[in-house]
Image: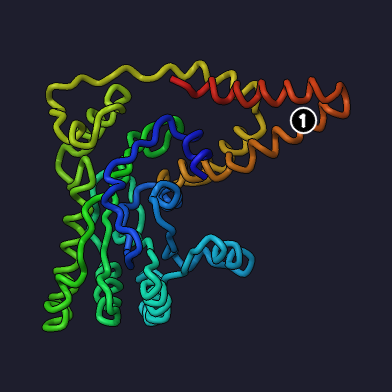
């Protein structure tokens, strides 16, 4: 998965991975801007083993065994109906079993995905899981905020900066929760929110947040550190020229079937937040299958040397076409 993600993105930058607690129960809370690609990025590059709380509607009779193998745990949301929220108690119990074994669980505290760089209001789910679990643990539970800072949400060969923040000790908020559960939940939620904002280049919604994002997340800034990106003054930076897309023609000539499939699928998806995830997910399977089919066609018609050469040309043609 690391290899596939590094092939899809131009650059994946990691900061703060020394902040990730080891051998301790942990709740990981990344922001959620890019559908399932967010979970893949965190899971591939965090230096610990993760389980994932995942929207229950993707668990079908055929997908459930596969998702379970990938350490995904179904969770119900408000949009699934208030009557189903009570079913989350058994899910949280499963999480607590993991915490007793120093396990780690990822939850998207915003509750859903969104296309903007700033942090949206959090639900109380992560705070409730943290505080209810800490009550039953004889060890300290931590919450780790993670910031996914995409230079372009929908484009392949863009840059993403994964920023691991400072862990939050849940025990510091337990007494307030025991004194008053409602206020305790809000306090814990706000602490998680502030921790997550500290990992984002653009932490909050402002009138000019879209302009700031366009100016800050430019190709010429992709080697900047997190703090350097934070210090950019949008008023003093000019917009860069659009990237020349003519090189992509080579990829279409050599790999028409996978690219047509991706374009066909995306045409029916109105929510742009899914686009990058679907590009990656479809390409992960479609390109190898296409290369394998072409290999066998050439192998049975002109021989193995030409077959191998054809696959090499297609692979490197795709790689070259999307380089800067």
Question: Considering the image in quadrants, where does the C terminus appear?
Answer: top left
Q: Residue 249's spot in the image, x, y percent?
A: 57, 19
Q: Residue 315's spot in the image, x, y percent?
A: 62, 26
Image side of residue 155 versus residue 202, left or right = right
User: Residue at left 20%, top 58%?
Assistant: 193
| Number of marks in picture | 1
Image side of residue 304 versus residue 318, left or right = right
Location of residue 90 with respect to 200 vertically, above or below:
below
Image side of residue 200 versus residue 50, left or right = left
Q: Nearer the viewer, residue 132 or 115?
A: 132
Disc 1, SS: helix
Looking at this view, name the residue that lies furthest to the right: 301
Q: Nearer the viewer, residue 255 or 200?
A: 200
Q: Which residue is mark 1?
A: 295
Looking at this view, name the residue that lies furthest to the front: 23
- Is residue 293 visible in the rendered structure shown here? yes
Q: Residue 89's spot in the image, x, y percent?
A: 38, 81
Location of residue 72 with respect to 290 vertically, above or below:
below
Image side of residue 216 versus residue 80, left or right = left
- Is residue 84 visible in the rendered structure shown here? no
Q: How is the image coloured?
A: rainbow
User: Residue at left 21%, top 40%?
Assistant: 201
Q: Residue 41's spot in the image, x, y percent?
A: 42, 47
Q: Choose top left, top right, bottom left or bottom right for residue 140.
A: bottom left
User: Residue at left 77%, top 30%?
Assistant: 295
User: Residue at left 88%, top 25%?
Assistant: 301
Q: Residues within 10 Å of mark 1 (few under 14, many from 20)?
A: many
Q: Nearer the viewer, residue 140 or 173?
A: 140
Q: Nearer the viewer, residue 303 or 126?
A: 303
């Amino acid at each position: 998965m690391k290899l596939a993600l590094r092939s899809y993105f131009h650059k994946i930058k990691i900061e703060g991975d020394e902040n990730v607690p080891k051998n301790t129960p942990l709740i990981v809370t990344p922001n959620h801007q890019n559908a399932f690609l967010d979970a893949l990025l965190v899971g591939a590059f965090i230096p610990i083993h993760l389980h994932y709380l995942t929207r229950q509607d993707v668990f079908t009779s055929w997908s459930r065994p596969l998702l379970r193998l990938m350490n995904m745990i179904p969770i119900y949301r408000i949009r699934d109906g208030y009557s189903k929220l009570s079913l989350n108690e058994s899910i949280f119990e499963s999480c607590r079993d993991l915490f007793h074994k120093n396990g780690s669980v990822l939850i998207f505290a915003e509750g859903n995905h969104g296309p903007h760089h700033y942090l949206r209001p959090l639900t109380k789910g992560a705070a409730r899981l943290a505080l209810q679990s800490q009550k039953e643990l004889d060890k300290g539970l931590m919450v780790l905020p993670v910031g996914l800072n995409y230079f372009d949400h929908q484009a392949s060969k863009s840059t993403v900066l994964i920023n691991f923040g400072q862990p939050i000790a849940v025990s510091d908020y337990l007494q307030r929760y025991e004194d008053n559960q409602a206020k305790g939940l809000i306090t814990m939620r706000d602490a998680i929110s502030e921790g997550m904002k500290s990992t984002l280049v653009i932490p909050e919604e402002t009138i000019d947040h879209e302009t700031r994002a366009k100016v800050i997340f430019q190709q010429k800034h992709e080697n900047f550190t997190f703090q350097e990106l934070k210090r950019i003054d949008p008023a003093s930076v000019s917009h860069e020229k659009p990237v020349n897309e003519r090189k992509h023609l080579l990829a279409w000539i050599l790999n028409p079937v996978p690219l047509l499939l991706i374009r066909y699928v995306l045409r029916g998806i109105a929510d742009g937040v899914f686009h990058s995830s679907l590009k990656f997910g479809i390409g992960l399977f479609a390109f190898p299958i296409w290369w394998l089919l072409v290999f066998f066609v050439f192998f049975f018609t002109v021989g193995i040397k030409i077959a191998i050469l054809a696959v090499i040309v297609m692979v490197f043609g795709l790689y070259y076409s999307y380089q800067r």
